[in-house]
Amino acid sequence: MNRPLRYGMVGGGEDAFIGAVHRHAMALDHRFAFTAGALSSTPEKAKRSAHALRLPNDRGYESWQAMLEGELALPEDERIELVSIVTPNHVHYPVAKAFAEAGFHVVSDKPLVHTSDQASDLERIVRERGIVFGVTYNYTGYPLVKEMRRLVREGRIGAVRKVVVGYHQGWLATKLEDEGAKQAEWRTDPERSGAAGAIGDIGSHAENLVSTVTGLELEAICADLTTFVPGRRLDDDGNLLLRFQGGAKGVLIASQVEIGHENDLVLQVYGETGSLRWHQENPNELWYAPLDQPVQLLRRSNPYLGPEAAAVTRIPAGHPEGYLEAFANVYGEIAAAIHRHAAGSGADGDYPTVADGARGVRFIETTVASAASDAKWTPFPSASA
């Protein structure tokens, strides 16, 4: 169970942001061994990136197709066991489909794919091949997000009445995509990003956080998407009203033009007997307000927290843990699931699955449809639809 898993990465080479984050997170607990990579869509850059990251010459591939072929040609005890996909969105589906069909475990960045048909196809392949498939909704890995989920699920704030989630950024307040900014270029390009801009990039994180913590299921969405920056082809600001099954209501904001905000993700959950508030930029604290009692400030790595939070806490109270550790927690759960899978005991675990990724795709599609509709309130499709 403690043996590091051999993994290959697609994307994440020179000038990439998120690939390095994934590699650092995967290295944190020694659960993974970086073994192979197809680190760029440009063959020369792929080979150069592999050399810079000290991959063996024969395991630094010029394309993901070459990596799939090369790894399948190796003995099973030498080839990679997992592929991590950290490319722009349009590459997720073909890579995930090919490696999953070949029997490799898969981790994909979010949003999972461009369309719900593609998402359903991946769900089918995962069922048929029986593999582990994780999606890196990394904010679910924070200890106090797990504690927030426990308090909600155990009824500590009563039945949920209202959820307010906001993901506020300001980095796209100007047309950076015209200035050679790589991260802005592909995120604002419909061919690569998909049908949505901010709502797909960060709004999907907000949706997943709400679902993970509350367990509420969406019933309908009323969305107002705006492109404030002239000439931009995708939304850079989204304001949504949410209706959940059972009667709870919600507000979701996802904006990348709110000047002064960096990565300001805030989740507030209001119930019949209390409320909870968590702020990603101050992730080691959870605000808890029971009805008619003093407001409590819960802090990471204290004995009053539940076992789920304790299990993903590494260092004592007062020593902050953050973004990389949360990423590592998601990967750690995926590693444990892969080991259980190898032992024949299933692939369940506390990590975002392909089903969570598929729901995120339906969320994006429904939001875009609502914003384009005169009726506005657009029913949310079920997983079986």
Image (cartoon, rainbow, N blue to C red):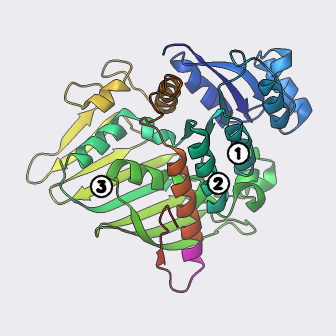
Disc 3 residue crowd, few under 14, some 14–19, many 20+, Cα 10 Å: many
Identify the residue under disc 1: 97
* Residue at image location 58% in from the left, 36% down from the top: 131
Query: Can you identify the residue that label 2 sits on?
Result: 121
Q: Viewed as shown, does residue 142 lie left or right of 305?
A: right
Relative depth, front residue between 312 and 58: 58
Three-letter amino acid code at the position of disc 3: Val
Q: Does the segment drawn in magenta span residue 47? A: no
Please report the bounds of the magenta region as a residue range. 369-373
From the top left corner, tell me how far across and down residue 159 is, in percent. Answer: 21, 59
Residue 236 x, y percent position in the rendering:
62, 62
Amino acid type, callout 1: Lys
Q: Residue at x 80, y 23 (%)?
A: 50
Q: Is residue 303 left or right of residue 294?
A: right
Give the labeled residue for mark 3. Answer: 269
| Nearest to N terminus: mark 2 or mark 1 | 1
From the viewer's side, name the closer residue of 133 and 143. Answer: 133
Judged from this view, the residue extending furthest toward the left is 292
Q: Please give the label number shown on residue 307.
A: none
Placement of 324 over or under 244, stated as above or below: above
- Secondary structure that dominates the magenta span: helix
